[in-house]
Amino acid sequence: MPRHQRYERIARTEVVKSTVPRYNLSAMIVKGGRIVARGVNRMSRDRSVHAEVAALSQMIRRKANPEGAELHVYRFLADGSYGLAKPCQACQKALLEAGIKRVWYSDDDNQMKVFTLRAEN
């Protein structure tokens, strides 16, 4: 099974944990083909926590080294197709600060896209 299909299957099972039903996102940090951390959008007290930040927090709690890791983030629409899940500027900055430079995300055209984070992003 191609890696994106494997990660998508896992993301579809994880996304049901999201507590932000209108914008379900599932993020995972992958290193060396292994998922080292996962996160979903959720509400925490009076604020929302983005899936990317939740995954970063889990990675930090597990003391995983982010060197060489990449983020995969998915949004699923009601019909099962992809929605746009490109990380916001604040999440991109947090990812870059953590040392994650490559991001895969689902897009409205039902494809996965990739970009590299740089200090000027």
Image (tube, helix red, strand yellow):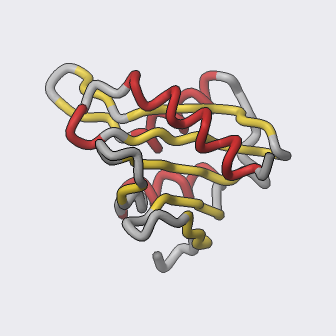
Towards the viewer: 96 or 4: 4
Q: Is residue 32 above or below residue 120?
A: above
Please report the residue visible at 55 percent of the width from the left and 69 percent of the height from the top.
113
Towards the viewer: 87 or 59: 87
The residue positioned farthest toward the front in the image shown: 79
Number of numbered discs overlaid on the protein picture:
0
Towards the viewer: 69 or 10: 10
Residue 52, horizontal then vertical, whole percent = 47, 44
Residue 60, horizontal then vertical, whole percent = 61, 31
Q: Is residue 89 above or below residue 50?
A: below
The residue positioned farthest toward the left in the image shown: 46
Residue 80, horizontal then vertical, whole percent = 40, 45
Please report the residue visible at 60 percent of the width from the left and 51 percent of the height from the top.
71
Residue 66, horizontal then vertical, whole percent = 71, 45
The residue positioned farthest toward the right in the image shown: 32
Q: Quadrant of residue 117?
A: bottom right
Q: Is residue 81 left or right of residue 39?
A: left
Q: Is residue 57 above or below residue 80?
A: above
Please report the residue visible at 52 percent of the width from the left and 66 percent of the height from the top.
111
Please report the residue visible at 51 percent of the width from the left and 49 percent of the height from the top.
73
Q: Is residue 44 left or right of residue 72?
A: left
Q: Is residue 66 left or right of residue 107?
A: right
